Image: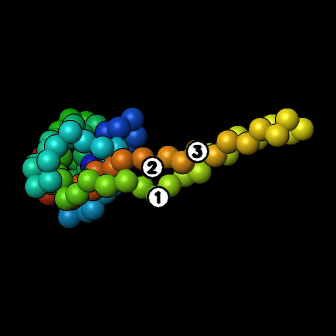
Amino acid sequence: MFAVIKTGGKQYRVEPGMLLKVEKLPADVGETVEIEASLIKDDQGNIKTEGKVEAEVVEHGKHKKVLVFHFKRKKNYKKLNGHRQPYTLIKIKDIKA
């Protein structure tokens, strides 16, 4: 059984028991969140277009730093910035059709 969920502007294929890093969610660690499923396929091969996925928030964190370097030749212009995108680690508990 698997489902396709959409969160943070991205789509993910999930199965029960799976750990997944998604864009930061406004939920505390240990809370259960429900995410709309756009597609669900059960063990018999039946496909449904509506449902919910129940997930538990495991942790919040930040990804590795991405360096952004701006440079203009002949002008002695150099600028270095870094960015760390926040994420939420969730564990898929159940898929409800």
What's the residue type where badge 1 is placed?
A: Lys
Q: Earlier in the sequence, mark 2 or mark 1?
A: 1
What's the distance in space between the residues labelled 2 and 3, CA to CA? Answer: 10 Å
As helix, strand or loop, the secondary structure at mark 2 comes to loop
Residue at label 1?
64
Q: Please determine whether, in this image, residue 90 is positioned above or below residue 50.
A: below
How many residues crowd around disc 1 within 10 Å: few (fewer than 14), some, or many (20 or more)? few
Q: Residue at (31%, 55%) from the top-left corner?
A: 61
Position of residue 50 measured from the top left corner of the image (x, y, whole percent): 20, 35
What's the distance in space between the residues labelled 2 and 1, CA to CA? Answer: 6 Å
Q: Please determine whether, in this image, residue 56 is positioned above or below residue 81.
A: below
Please state which of residues 43 and 71 is positioned toward the viewer in this rendering: 71
As drawn, the label of residue 81 is 3
Please state which of residues 92 and 64 is positioned toward the viewer in this rendering: 64
Quadrant for the N terminus in the image: bottom left
Please tell me how many numbered marks the rendered image carries. 3
Q: Please determine whether, in this image, residue 64 is positioned above or below residue 26.
A: below
